[in-house]
Amino acid sequence: MEKSDLVRLTAWLISVIVLVAGEDEDVEDLFGLDYSQIRAPKGIGGGPVLVQIGIHFLNVKVDEDSQTLQFDCYLRTVWQDQRIIVPHNASEVQLDTAIVSRLWVPNTFFVHVQSVTRPMLLSDASGIILYQNKTVSHSSLYLTKYTCNLDYHKYPMDTQRCVVRIQSYGYTNISMILGWHFTGISWDKDIRMRSFELVDMRTLEPSFITFFDGSYSELSFEVLLARKVRNSVLSVYVPSTMLIIVSWLSLWVPPKLVPGRMVLAITTLLTLTGLFNANVSQSMPEVSYVKALDVWILACIVFVFGTIVEYIVVLRLFYDGDQTAPSPDKRAQEVSWTECRKWNGVEKAVVLEKVSRALSPVMFLIFNVVYWGYYLTTD
């Protein structure tokens, strides 16, 4: 090794030692002799320290397969620690995140969280600021996956409500209480999700939860999500309604045209079944209870199947009454209901056809009023 290299190496080592010693001296200047990283600081009047939390969301995502709510957020935690010695010549001091190993920090956590990661590029995405009034502000970027049990009773018109809870882990309400920072909950307005719309995020009142060893402070906020219905309307509701109308057209086909009328009815039923298998089964969540879309599917199949059953009854009545091809019978229009027992099979079939043509749309209309009125108005 040359002499110049040795000189440069020696100078570098000296600078590192001086820098580390200077940092240690600066860190030691912040803490008094009575400072304890384990013991929580005292609050106003010697009571529990108030830890305030504010959250800003950058992105929100719902994973329906794993029943989780994923969000990227800035979590800001603010508290006062009167034991810290703040330099008089500085209104605020930016501290290295490594000081966390020496500083008392509240051990809050998300309840029912599956994973929490903190992204980093050159260093952790976090920071600590110390203010002149001995207020400590710790902020960090977190990628969180939180368990949220979704309710699909009104699918695809469902509105999901996920309540996220934040608790104190090791300090009871005697030592520490949680409260919302004045910034509260906020989020970027350009958050977009594939299947949901972000309706609102709102904080709930702070509360306490009691365990066997004491009472702990808890904060909670709820995330309201509304499913986007446009895709379901265009891919399921509108096509299935049109297929039901097509099935009604078979009621106007003369009963003597057995192949044409039966093919029309059966094809409509098969097309409806294929539509549901292709567009619904692949996207519908698998749950053990009945969803709103299940009710619609079953009703559509019943209406189409009803036209087939009606035609079978009509054929049976025709061939019981007359083996020849039927024609409109004016006598069947003039006879009263009290004389229906005197009608022959052809007359009964003609009346059944007319009643079915009028009753089918009315029944479907009544079903739609009840269906949409129930699922769109109930919570």
Image: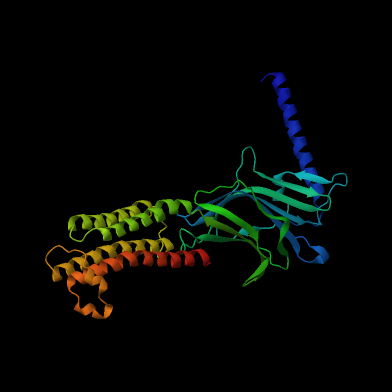
Q: Is residue 113 left or right of residue 28?
A: left
Q: Residue at x 26, y 73 (%)?
A: 334
Observer able to see residue 289 = no
Residue in the foreground of this view, choosing between 354 and 223:
354
Where, by quadrant of the figure, is residue 245 drawn?
A: bottom left
Where, by quadrant of the figure, is residue 13 drawn?
A: top right
Q: In the picture, which quadrant includes the N terminus?
A: top right
**377 over 79 or under it: above or below:** below
Q: Residue at x 54, y 55 (%)?
A: 69
Observer able to see residue 57 = yes
Q: Position of residue 53 (x, y in %)?
A: 70, 56
Q: Is residue 200 left or right of residue 250?
A: right
Q: Residue at x 73, y 59 (%)?
A: 51
Q: How many marks?
A: 0
Q: Hey, which residue is sitting farthest bottom in the picture?
A: 338
**306 over 36 or under it: above or below:** below
Q: Position of residue 327 (x, y in %)?
A: 19, 63
Q: Hey, which residue is sitting farthest left in the picture?
A: 323
Q: Position of residue 144 (x, y in %)?
A: 57, 52
**342 over 259 or under it: above or below:** below
Residue in the foreground of this view, choosing between 47 and 310:
310
